[in-house]
Amino acid sequence: MLRLRPTATGGGLGVSLAISADGGSGLPTATPETIEEAAGLMANLPAGGDRIRIHGGGSHRGIGYPVSSDVILSTSGLDRVVAWEPDDLTVVVEAGVLVEELEQMLASKGQTALLPEQPGTGTVGGAIATAISGWRRYRYGPIRDRVLETTLVSSDGRVVTAGGRVVKNVTGYDIPRLATGSLGAMGLIARVCLKLWPVPQASATVPVESPEEALEVAYRPLAVLETREGAAVFLGGTPEEVSGQAAALGAVPTSGLNWPSHPSGAVRFSVRTPPSSLRGIVDGLDPGWTYLAQFGVGEVTVGAGEVDLEELGELRGRAESLGGALVMLDAPPSLAGAFDPWGTPPPSIEIQRRVVNLFDPGRRINRGILPGRI
Amino acid sequence: MLTLPPVVQPLTTTIPLAVKRSLELELRRRLGDEQVASDPLDLYVFGKDSGLVRGEPGLVVFPRNTTEVATIMRLAGRHGVPVVPRGSGTGLAGGAVTTGPHVLLVTTRMNRIGPVDVENRCVWVQPGVINLDLSIHTTPLGLHYAPDPSSQSVCTIGGNVANNSGGPHCLAEGTTVNHVLAMEIVTSDGDVLSIGGPAPDPTGLDIRGLMVGSEGTLGIVTDVLVNLLPPPPASRTILLAFPEVQNAAATVSGIIANGLIPAALEMMDQPMTIAVERFANAGFPTDSAAVLIAEVTGHPSAVDAEAELVRRLAVSHRATLTRIASDEAERKRIWLGRKSAFGAIAQMNPDYYLHDTVVPRTRLVEAIEQTYAISKRHDIPMLNVFHAGDGNLHPLMSFDASVPGVMERVDAAGRDLIEMCVAIGGSLSGEHGIGMEKRDYMHLVFDEMGLDAQARIREALDPDGRLNPGKIVPQGSRCFDFGRPPPVGAWV
């Protein structure tokens, strides 16, 4: 269980930081315990051997182009809950805090950061760097709607704070929103302030035949999900609302939110489409694949043992023609080189490149990971 | 006609007369005379938004489509003249006021609403569409546009995007940024670019999110794909009155602590309630220190229980009135009263200055008490109306600017308000933007590196300062040159 701890003041800078070898990659790994240490480390890496890869909990390491690096910076030492203001519905945490532990702590006072459900070893920093939203986004919106403030450590050791610790704010450019999903390219996401929501008093899972029809009947459910095993509506609210909505859906609910498992497999990817096109995409998936489709949102996550490149390419073509995308989440090395992880870069790619280059001019952190190999 | 001295001295630039003439000639030739105004009266009228800062544009242009916006950007760029976008001019921070004889690009003729995509609940709208017109247009389809600023009957969607506007109902529904899926922009180079899309999570950085709230300094929005929502199946609007402001604030905290996020939680203090009641006859009690309007929306089986919870909490905090609107007419009357607050002020004095700051919700009482102290200290009456649910304060100063010395006191009181809110953990603006008004206060919330990062964003999208110069980012913010610092121990 997490406890609230004051931010430790930085002792030495990066030069004195112990660097150990990473078990998997054999690369030197630094585990700073304070933001100041992280900044010192970044500023003092030797030129020429200074490409940095950031590691969080490792739950989404397969996203983006492969990154070659000289050093790994692990966020596991940045594990403090800096401030929790239950009455303001805000929490300030460092990047390495585990999603599961944070949510447990918040639940003790009936609150949630709406971070991804079933996060495994995922960290808060990782969830924000990858912009992976939880399934409750149909009701509450995507993760970037809740990142109020970010403290980034740039590759030359500058500590940049943007946003603010208030729930409504238009003071300056929305750098927190840009950092969410940046995969570290604007700097190490070291500390964030998140907007919280109260956990509804009651919740239920209602099995349904048709997610589309359920969306017409239910008023703003938390989620409407479908897997190979069937579909369900996830409800939250006052006890009166939950039982009323369940009755309207005409099925016997089970109490609580019984989330399905993530699709598994050596290959995992996400297809994003306008919500009304999701059914067409889901019905066209290979019968050998497992999936989890978020109706009303327009995203389906797919797991497969192996995939046919042509089949995957066709699926990407359909998603992109609808204005969406097919994004690889995990791929074996053989596939990683043969199939682009992002697909066609968005039209704003040159603006993105300019922004990133101004925040990390040498492109030292996770170089080339983003669309357009930024 | 009354001219108020500017609160903030604009950064002024000069443009040689010959350059201005050549640009005007070309614009008239390319867009037509109807689309270009340079008459001194036009320049005067368009020299202001709804705040206190005044500027004077060199030219005013009224493009009708994206191509014309791109033409204006390119021609102005070639002449070295910056372009400042403007919607209806309801902004309060000088965001649409030129800081020199620049081209003011008024979007009001770009007011087409595209076909509504009912299945995906979204629609493309041009920036000049009036906020309320959009909801009126989509109501027959059972949909509405959620952000509802008090100025919604006059403000434009483009202006809402520029300021990330909120409104009373953004507590549960979010502000503009939560309702914009995609947009088309004209960049500082005059290129047309599509950003975001109808599917969730477009790949790469969220440039769409960055554009929202950027006050026309990063690009000119020429088309916006907005999300629409079905109206809630049921709602209850509750009018509450309290003997002390503290009781109202405690009720707000109590509601949130009980796990309820109402659709709206709006507070007015007694001076404001008196002004509003005189103006709108909304049935607000004028003998209470604070009035709170709470609205709960949702499933029919939920709203009664939620309204009862709100009522019970209010009673436990000494509420002297708890009235649930009995019908739609009464509900509308309550909201009309709330949204008339700024009109009501006009009865008291010739001038007003509306502030917009935000504090953590838990510091509301302290913020209000200090606001009263500041009002007294500078002898400027302040009325308070605010989005209590998210700690967004709107102290409204009422005064007569023709009285010698008043503007100096208004300016000083404004500065004290901002410094007070920042000191208790708040920020400069909740929904009105930084513009010119608060540009020089940015250092209160950002350190040098924070300001430098803001300037870098600006530099990435508008390296030559062609778009709305002198806004948001204070001069001299870009002070760090990137490059590795020398290694520790090196001689420098």
Image: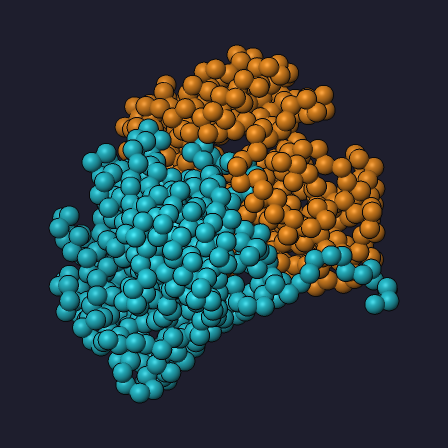
**Residue A201 at what x, y percent from top left?**
38, 43
In the image, B266 versus B73, the foreground residue is B73
Q: Is residue B333 left or right of residue B308?
A: left
Instruction: Please name the residue shown 47% across and 49% down the image.
Output: B74
Residue B333 visible from this viewpoint: yes
Residue B315 visible from this viewpoint: no
Location of residue A90 with respect to A144 vertically, above or below? below
Letter of the chain in cyan:
B
Q: Is residue B29 left or right of residue A42?
A: left
Q: Answer with the quarter of the image where residue B167 lies.
A: bottom left
Instruction: Please name the residue shown 15% across and 63% down the image.
Output: B280
Q: Is residue B334 left or right of residue A366?
A: left
**Residue A317 at what x, y percent from top left?**
52, 21
Instruction: Please name the residue shown 62% across and 58% down the image.
Output: A160
- Point out the image quarter for the N terminus of chain B: bottom left
- Point out the image quarter for the C terminus of chain B: bottom right
Residue found at the very far bottom of the displayed protein: B404
Instruction: Please name the residue shown 75% across and 53% down the image.
Output: A42
Residue found at the very far top of the displayed protein: A287
Q: Answer with the quarter of the image where residue B5 lies.
A: bottom left
In the image, B27 versus B336, the foreground residue is B27
How has the structure been colored for display?
A: by chain
Q: How many marks?
A: 0
Q: Answer with the quarter of the image where residue A149 lies.
A: bottom right
Location of residue B350 with respect to B224 vertically, above or below? below
Colour chain A appears in: orange
**Residue A373 at what x, y percent from top left?**
66, 36
**Residue A156 at what x, y percent from top left?**
72, 55
In the image, B427 versus B95, the foreground residue is B95
